[in-house]
Every structure is written in C-alpha cells, then in structure tokens.
Amino acid sequence: MSKCKVCRGPAVIDLPRHNANFCAEHLQQLCRRQVEKAIADHEMLEPGERVLVAVSGGKDSLAVWDMLVELGYEADGLYIGLGIGEYSDVSGRYARDFADARGLRLRTIDLRDEHGYDVPTASQATRRVPCSACGLSKRHLFDSAAREGGYDVVATGHNLDDEAAVLLGNTLRWDIDYLARQLPALPGGDGFPRKVKPLVRLTERETAAWCIVRGIDYQIEECPMAAGNKHLGYKATLNQLEARSPGAKASFYLGFVDRMAPLLAGHSRAAVDGLRACATCGSPTTNEVCAFCHLVEVSAAHEPVPVEMLSRGRRR
Amino acid sequence: MSKCKVCRGPAVIDLPRHNANFCAEHLQQLCRRQVEKAIADHEMLEPGERVLVAVSGGKDSLAVWDMLVELGYEADGLYIGLGIGEYSDVSGRYARDFADARGLRLRTIDLRDEHGYDVPTASQATRRVPCSACGLSKRHLFDSAAREGGYDVVATGHNLDDEAAVLLGNTLRWDIDYLARQLPALPGGDGFPRKVKPLVRLTERETAAWCIVRGIDYQIEECPMAAGNKHLGYKATLNQLEARSPGAKASFYLGFVDRMAPLLAGHSRAAVDGLRACATCGSPTTNEVCAFCHLVEVSAAHEPVPVEMLSRGRRR
C-alpha cells in the first residue's frame, strides 16, 4: 500500500510528475496550492471581485467553481445548453445539481431557445467541425453575459492537459495569432471581460481526483461530437511524451508562458489590426460583423440536425 | 503498378505528402527542385563560392555533396573520424569510396590522432550523452577547417526529419537560444563561416531514395551511440503526427522558419551576450574558453573507452 508523501497515511493517487503519492487531504492541499499559485502568478483575481464561471457539468468546470467558492470568491455559474442530444441533457443536470446542493447561483442559456440554433445544426450549416461552432458560441456568450451581468472576470476550467494540447496544435501550425493569445489570464478591456484559467497548473487526472475526493458528481462522458478530433490526438501525443519523460507536459506549457509568450506580446491579430464594434451586436471584433453574429445568421435558418446524423456524415 | 505523376512511367516511390508517385527520373527532378528552392529562399549559396561539405558517410551527407557538385558548386568534403568502433570505420570507407569514384577532394580529421580523444571517451569523461560531445566536436572542427581552408560556407546534410525533430525538442523545452539559431542558413561573421542546410525541404525517405536511384552506397546503420536518444523519440512522434495528417512535419518546420524565426531574431545568447575569442584557440565563444577546448581538456586526459562498455553503462 503506497503512502502519502506528506503524512504517510494511505495514498489515494500517485503523481509521477511530483514523484509522490498523496492521501485525499494532501491531494486537496496540492490542488489548492497550485490554483493559488496560478492566480497569484498571473494576477487572475483580486479579493472581492465578481467571477462568472463557465460551467459545462464536467469535472474541470465544477472543480474550478468549487475551488473559487472555497477560496472565498463570489462566483456564479453560467451553463450553455448546446443541444448535443442526451449528452447536453445529462451535463446540464450535473451542473444544476452541483449548484443546488451548494446554494450557488447558476444561469442557463439555451442556444436553440435564445438564438435559434444548436451545435450539431451549426456544424452542418457552416460545414465545419462541431468544436468550431461550439467554442465560438461559448466564448461569445460568456463574454456578453459577463458584460451584461457586471462581472469582473470569466473563469474557465481549462486544465494543463487542455492548454498543452491546444498549445501543441497552435505550435505545429505556428499560428502566431493564437499563440499570442494563449495565456493563463487575458486582461480585459476593449469591451472584453478579463478571462482566467485557474486550473492551468493541474492535470486532468488531478482535477478528476479533486472531484472524487470532494464528492462532486460530474459528466464523465467525452462530448460525442469531439470523438476523433485533433485536440484529443494532441493530448494522446503529449501523454506519450509525458510517459517517456515525466514533467514534459508541464514544462512545455509553463515554459511557453514564462519564456515564449512575452516575446509574442503585441503580435495577436487584435493587437495588430485593432478592434471595432460588431455592426449587429456591438461586441468587439476585428471584422465588420463578429463571428458569432455570422454564425447565427448562417445557422439559425436551418432545420435542426440530430446528433446521430451528423456524427455519421461529418468531415474529420 | 503505380505510375509516375509526371510521365506515367513505372514509379519507384510514393510520397503521401505530395499525394503522388514518382519514377527515378522525376524523383531526382523533385529533389533537385526542392534543393534549389531551399538555396534560393534562404540565400544559401552564390555561384562560384567554395563549399565545405560535412561528410559522415550516411545518405544525407553524400546526397547533399552529390547535389551540390551536380549543381555546379566547388564542393570539397570533410570527414571526421569520431572513433565509434566499427561504425566509424565503415562510415569513413563509404565517404572515401564516394569521393574517390567521383574524383572529389575529401579531407579527414581523426579525433584521437589530432586531438587525443574520441566520442565514447569524451562521453564518459564528461558524463554526458555521446551525442553532446559528438555534435560539439563536429561543429567546432567544421567551422575551424572552413576558416583555415578559406571556404565561404559549410554545408551539412540535415534533412526535414532531422530539423523537425530538433525543432520539436527545442519547442517542448522552449529553449529560446536554440530556437533563435535553428535556421536553414546561418549567416557568417564574428569568425564563423556561413552554415547552410540545403536538404531541409527533403525528408529522409527522399534523400535515401535519391541515393538509391543515383547508385550511391552509404552507411545504413544508425550510430550505435544514438540508440534510444531523445532525437529519435521526437522523430517517432512526428512520424505519428505525419501519418495522421500528411504534410504536418513540413508545415511544422517550414512554418517555424517563415513565421516564428523572424520574431526570434536577436534573441540568441550570442546576439544578447556578444562573442569574444576563446583564450585557448581563438574561436568565437560566449565564454572565456570555448566549449571545444574545454571538452579536449577534460577528455584527452582519459584512457580510451571501448564503444561496447559505454553502451552498457551510459545514462539515458
């Protein structure tokens, strides 16, 4: 039986990159400290700020909400109904149950009810992978909800595995615009709320373990529309590199943030081209009409597409 | 039977990243054009310049020598005897046979005869991986031989697979100094000859095919001291990414050269700290004594270490 590195009690998890095992209590201590360090290092949050948490019902978003509340922040949740069949129904239920059990405030926006489309339909209408319409919708709606609700900052549950995989994809393409914006904290301004990722120092295995030891029930299924996407392929590649040299994933992501990101400051498209107000909704954009309004225009005119049909027919 | 994309004759190779097959003649045409494009894009060589080719006896160095001679450059070879047992003996023979058959000039420097050490011994003495002492020795000796011989430029056989693998390693560590110097052509100056890599647009499969259709015999064994090193691991990772999306490797390396490298200009350690003459040999260095002279001092005092002993005992 392996023992906790801190107290020698029975361990519940082994973490090769820390070369140690931890019990439930000291796993939580480790997670809390990593989150506090991320918040401090990147000036993510000030005491007393109002935080809007982007909640999906998965382990990461519930973990970050739980931790921020525990750390004393006034953190409300926003759940977006993406219309991805039963997957969305179940995810929404986990989000609501979590909020109800803790007396937290959760707002819900349903894409079809409020904007006339859902992710499967938008994917078909735009002939692009579903993750593209999904990410775009979520970014826009979290930003505008934060603006309208008077929140200082939007917090998301992106963990180290997520960020390292996105970084690997951006790096393999040397997409300077995306690289210049891939930071643990994006300052607000120009009509955007500040955006922060307090879990960037925690792996997905660690956030899952947090939820388990804290008794948080979450959606464990991967999104059915994400199966086979490049992001999951990059995660697998990084897991192989990590297995060959433990710590490689953290060193890749944190090294980027420390040493490369400062050299890219000012090279994002928004910094280069400047932003203006979307002619339709007023949100900041580099184009005349923002990408969200364009998506709504293209997608809302279509009949709903069932998830199953799209999974069979869609491009990879 | 697959057919050549150009002439519909019988193909000898399929190249998924070009989505085509090629016969022996049009494979050579493709290789020649890629090399000419690399030379032109990166201003590697001017007509009439004297080129010193770094020759190992492997496919890449013999292919680049062959191509440069065919393109009309005055290209001499330099072979360095690294003292890696039978592997070095066989490699040297291939290099000499190639030069003799074509009436080309090949100079040889033997590490043990001229500097009192060999790569296995240096690895043991420095307690570092053999590839470290090997690369350092070769860089120094090619540079100084070019200076002394009045060559304008040193050409090496680094291919796309090599460069992409080195780039992946440098990127995973975000080693800004190495990234800033990882260019297809490094301008001369400060006592350094210009250094060029004319094969950066060709994969190792393509350079091997070049040698086969040109009747060039080469050392096909991998260096026994390189087995299991990180560089080979990164090559394997990139081959997996390439299998999932053909062209990914070229896009990674060439995208770096096009879009990222310009942003790193001026960030190498030499550019930041400045260079001075090595107190021992006069070569340019950022330190008081250059890394080569330090290596000679540490390694030449040791008894020779047989390759086999080192392979068993060395660190990975």
Image (cartoon, coloured by chain):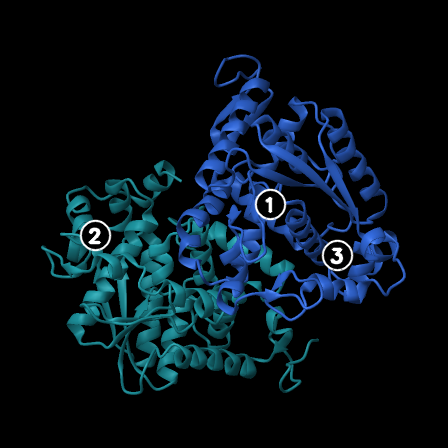
Chain colours: A blue, B cyan
Viewport quadrant of the C terminus of chain B: top left
Q: Nearer the viewer, residue B305 or A293?
A: A293
Q: Which mark is residue A91?
A: none
Q: Is residue A202 left or right of residue A230?
A: left
Q: Quadrant of residue A77?
A: top right
Residue A189 on image: x %, y %: 53, 54
Secondary structure beneath disc 2?
helix
Whether residue A246 is visible to the viewer of this picture, yes or no, is no
Determine which residue is flagged by label 3: A130
The residue indicated by pointer 2 is B291
Residue closer to the observer: B263 or B104: B263
In the rendered image, which residue does mark 1 sit on?
A162
Three-letter amino acid code at the position of disc 2: Ala
Q: Secondary structure at mark 3?
A: helix
Residue B3, placed above or below residue B243: below
Establish if B168 lies above or below A213. Answer: below
- Residues tagged 3 and 1 counted as in contact (Cβ below 8 A): no
Residue type for callout 1 = Asp
Q: Position of residue A213 (x, y in %)?
A: 65, 22
Label 3 marks a residue whose chain is A
Task: Judge by depth and name the residue closer to the eye, A248 or A134.
Answer: A134
